[in-house]
Image (tube, rainbow, N blue to C red):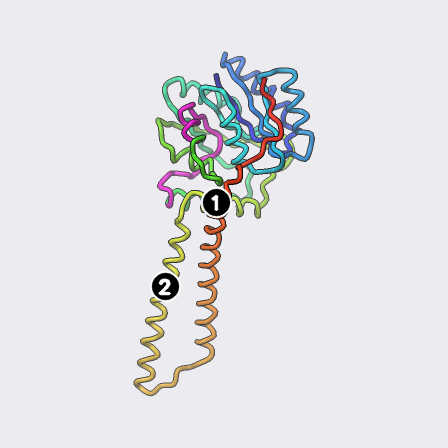
C-alpha cells in the first residue's frame, strides 16, 4: 500500500480538490493507498474538512496538532503514523504535481527505496527568493556533501527508510537533508513547480531565514568553524598591527592614534559578538535537546 502524507496549515481551500485529484489518479493507476493529512494547528476550518473527508472515505485520515509546530514535525508525524509499504510526501497546495506519484511508485516497484523529486523550475518565486534558496542549498550541499540543489520535500520513501528516520532521536530534524543523508538505493524524477491552487504561501522572508538557520544548525556544525576562522583572521590582523606598531616605535614615527584604535575596537567587537551569537545559537539547540520535549503534540488522530 502507498501512503500519501500531506502537511497542511490553513489549506481549507485546497483540501477537497487535492483529495479528489489523488483519488482519481491513484484509482486509475490501480494503486492501493491511504492519504494522511497532518493539520499543523490551522486557524481556519482545515480540520473540519479533513474530518468530513474521513467520514466519507476512511482512506483519508488525519492528524491534528494542538498548535502550529512547523512543516518538518508535521512530515515526521505523518511518517510515524502511516501504514504503507512506501510513502510519498506531498505539499497540499498542488505545486507538487500529484500525477508524478504514479511514476515514483513504478520506480519503487522496480526496487528503488528513495525516489527524489527534482525541480526543473522554481515556479513563480521572486528573484530574491530564488537567489536566496540557490545560495542556501549550494552552501548546504558543500557542508553536507549531499547535492541539495533543486531538491524538495516531494519524494517517495520505502518502509525501510521510514523506519530508519523514525529511529532518529533528535528534536530538530531537517527532513529534506536527512532523507538524503540516510542513503539507500535511490533515483530521481524531475517536475515543474505548479501554481498554487488557492491561497497564498505561508512562508514569509523572515520565516524562511529562521527556517534556514534552524536547518543548518540542526544538521551540521559548520558555522562553528566560522568562529575558528574569525579567530585566525583576528590573530593575523593582530600580528600585522603589532609588527607595524613595533617598527614605527623603533624608527621614531608616532602612530596615528584614535582612528586606527577605534576601527580596531569596533572590528574586534563585531567579530566577538558574531562569534558569541553563533555559539549561543548552538547552546540553545543543546538546551532544547536536553529538555527532551516532544517534537509535536497530537490533539486528535482520525484513523479507522
Where does label 1 land, which residue?
290
Closer to the chain start, of discs 2 and 1, is: 2
Residue occupying image coordinates x 65% and y 34%: 42
- Rounded to the nearest whole Å, what is the CA distance between mark 2 and mark 1? 34 Å
Q: Position of residue 287 (x, y in %)?
A: 49, 48
Nearest the eye: 242 or 286: 286
Specify few, some or many for label 2: CA neighbours under 10 Å numbering under 14, 14-19, or 20 or more. few
Q: Are marks 2 and 1 in contact (CB under 8 Å)?
A: no
Specify few, some or many for label 1: CA neighbours under 10 Å numbering under 14, 14-19, or 20 or more. few
* The residue positioned farthest toward the bottom in the image shown: 252
Q: Position of residue 77 (x, y in %)?
A: 53, 30
Q: Position of residue 273 (x, y in %)?
A: 48, 62
Q: Secondary structure at mark 1?
A: helix
* Res 6 → quadrant: top right
Q: Position of residue 199 (x, y in %)?
A: 65, 34
Residue occupying image coordinates x 60% and y 32%: 65
Q: Name the quarter where the C terminus is drawn.
A: top right
The part of the chain drawn in magenta is 143-165
Where does label 2 land, which residue?
233
* Above or below 223: residue 255: below
Residue occupying image coordinates x 31% and y 76%: 243
Nearest the eye: 244 or 160: 160
Nearest the eye: 168 or 270: 168
Q: Secondary structure at mark 2?
A: helix
55 is within the stretch colored magenta: no
Amino acid at each position: 500500500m502507498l501512503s500519501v502524507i500531506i502537511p497542511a496549515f490553513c489549506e481549507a481551500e485546497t483540501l477537497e480538490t487535492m483529495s479528489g485529484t489523488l483519488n482519481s489518479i491513484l484509482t486509475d493507476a490501480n494503486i492501493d493507498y491511504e492519504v494522511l493529512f497532518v493539520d499543523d494547528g490551522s486557524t481556519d476550518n482545515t480540520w473540519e474538512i479533513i474530518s468530513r473527508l474521513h467520514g466519507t472515505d476512511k482512506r483519508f485520515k488525519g492528524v491534528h496538532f494542538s498548535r502550529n509546530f512547523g512543516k518538518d514535525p508535521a512530515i515526521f508525524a505523518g511518517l510515524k503514523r502511516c501504514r504503507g509499504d512506501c510513502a510519498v510526501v506531498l505539499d497540499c497546495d498542488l505545486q507538487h504535481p500529484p500525477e508524478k506519484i504514479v511514476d515514483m511508485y513504478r520506480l519503487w516497484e522496480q526496487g528503488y527505496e528513495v525516489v527524489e523529486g527534482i525541480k526543473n523550475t522554481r515556479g513563480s518565486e521572486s528573484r530574491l527568493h530564488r537567489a536566496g534558496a540557490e545560495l542556501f542549498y549550494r552552501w548546504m550541499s558543500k557542508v553536507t556533501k549531499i547535492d541539495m540543489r533543486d531538491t524538495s520535500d516531494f519524494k517517495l520513501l520505502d518502509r525501510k527508510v521510514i523506519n530508519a528516520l523514525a529511529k532518529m532521536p533528535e528534536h530538530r530534524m531537517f527532513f529534506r537533508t536527512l532523507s538524503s543523508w540516510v542513503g539507500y538505493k535511490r533515483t530521481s524524477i524531475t517536475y515543474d513547480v505548479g501554481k498554487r491552487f488557492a491561497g497564498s504561501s505561508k512562508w514569509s522572508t523572515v520565516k524562511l531565514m529562521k527556517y534556514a538557520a534552524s536547518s543548518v544548525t540542526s544538521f551540521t556544525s559548520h558555522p562553528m568553524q566560522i568562529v575558528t576562522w574569525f579567530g585566525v583572521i583576528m590573530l593575523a590582523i593582530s600580528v600585522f598591527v603589532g609588527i607595524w606598531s613595533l617598527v614605527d616605535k623603533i624608527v621614531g614615527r608616532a602612530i596615528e592614534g584614535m582612528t586606527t584604535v577605534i576601527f580596531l575596537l569596533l572590528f574586534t567587537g563585531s567579530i566577538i559578538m558574531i562569534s558569541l551569537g553563533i555559539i549561543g545559537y548552538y547552546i540553545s539547540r543543546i538546551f532544547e535537546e536536553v529538555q527532551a520535549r516532544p517534537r509535536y503534540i497530537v490533539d486528535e488522530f482520525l484513523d479507522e
